Image (cartoon, rainbow, N blue to C red):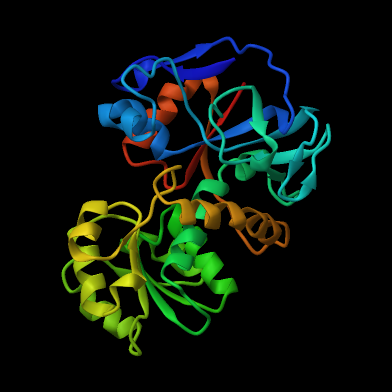
Amino acid sequence: MEVVETGFGNPSVLKIVPTDEVAPTPGEVAIEVRAAGVNHVDYTRYADPAGATKHGEGDNPFPMKLGVEVSGVVTAVGADAIGPAGPIVVGDEVIAYRVSGGYTDRLVAPSSAVVPKPTALSWTQAAVMMLDGTTAAHALAAVTARSGQTVLVHGASGGVGSFLAQLARTDGITIVGTTSENHFDDVSRFGATPVKYGPGLRERVDQAAPGGVDAAIDLVGTAEAADVSLALVSDRSRIATIVDSKRAKRDGFQALGGSPGQDEVGIKIRMNARLRLTALAQASLLAVEVAKTFTFAEVAQAHQLLARGGAGGRIVLIPR
């Protein structure tokens, strides 16, 4: 079985349909999916009519598959099934990212998308580490953050922000992260210095980083995030956003994309980051937090929660 989008609208357009048995061809593997990550991009593809075109689906994309990251067990392999970590064999516990149609109990994916699942993580944790983790790695690389430097991160308590703080900590980079006061503990737990967003933000950042900030990353897309970043970082090539491409184009800083055709250099950075992420997780140096798990039958509820702003952490689907 798999979940597909049957039209534009609200989560009621999500339907469960049978999955055809497909054998892997050369360079592919078949995976019994144990968990699938629920991401905002899944929701916007049918909630926003422009979303399908943006993701290359054309004028009549339905029924549309969704889900870009999963964890599971390899059940069959095609010839030359070699992943980033080496040959893949039946029985391997794996993560697959980036894939198409991850909301399914059986998935055929290119072997290039498949990496070993850290044994230190549960199936649900493993299913939600790659999109956020690789986005964080891309952002740090894009602003050329280095050991000993300080980076301002707007929206540090979200999924990408938590990975960004942890990756920065392992690299000796200091993070000053904006958030609401009720999330200060979450930001501090991952090694970042929390500051409250809102009026007076620039002054609070100055207090938190008296030596100044070397770069800024916007994960929220507010005018405040762009204004404060531009005020504090003179080199606009060291400011990046993952959400506000219009402002980035207007003011000459970086807009980062994660879909094919948007940013090919960024795609390469993200794909190259996968093995580092799994190694850090295996060494218990990367925490992955799951807030809520739903079955496929409850997918509409999962997306309703996502549309309301999430569950304070990552949302996961399991087949049953």
Quadrant in which residue 215 is drawn: bottom left
Q: From the image, which quarter does the C terminus lie in?
A: top right
Is 199 in front, or is 56? 56
90 is higher (above) or lower (below) than 205 = above
Residue at the limit of the structure toward the bottom, as seen here: 211
Q: Quadrant of residue 185?
A: bottom left
Residue 302 vs 186, above or below: the answer is above
Residue 48 sits in quarter: top left
Q: Is residue 289 above or below residue 211?
A: above
Q: Is residue 297 visible?
A: no
Query: Residue 170 vs residue 312: left or right?
Result: right
Whether residue 189 can be seen here: yes
| Residue displayed at 65% across by 31% down | 109
93 shown above or below 177: above
Q: Position of residue 286 (x, y in %)?
A: 62, 60
Residue visible at 39% across and 31% down in the picture: 56
Q: Nearer the viewer, residue 1 or 252?
A: 252
Left or right of residue 268: residue 216: left
Front residue of 204 and 220 = 220
**Residue 222 percent coordinates (x, y):** 22, 57
Quarter of the picture holding the N terminus: top right
Out of 181 and 154, give the one closest to the viewer. Answer: 154
- At horizontal 42% and vertical 32% (from top left) the residue drawn is 42
Image point (67%, 42%), residue name: 112
Position in image of residue 193 (x %, y %): 41, 74
Image position, residue 6 (x, y; %): 39, 14
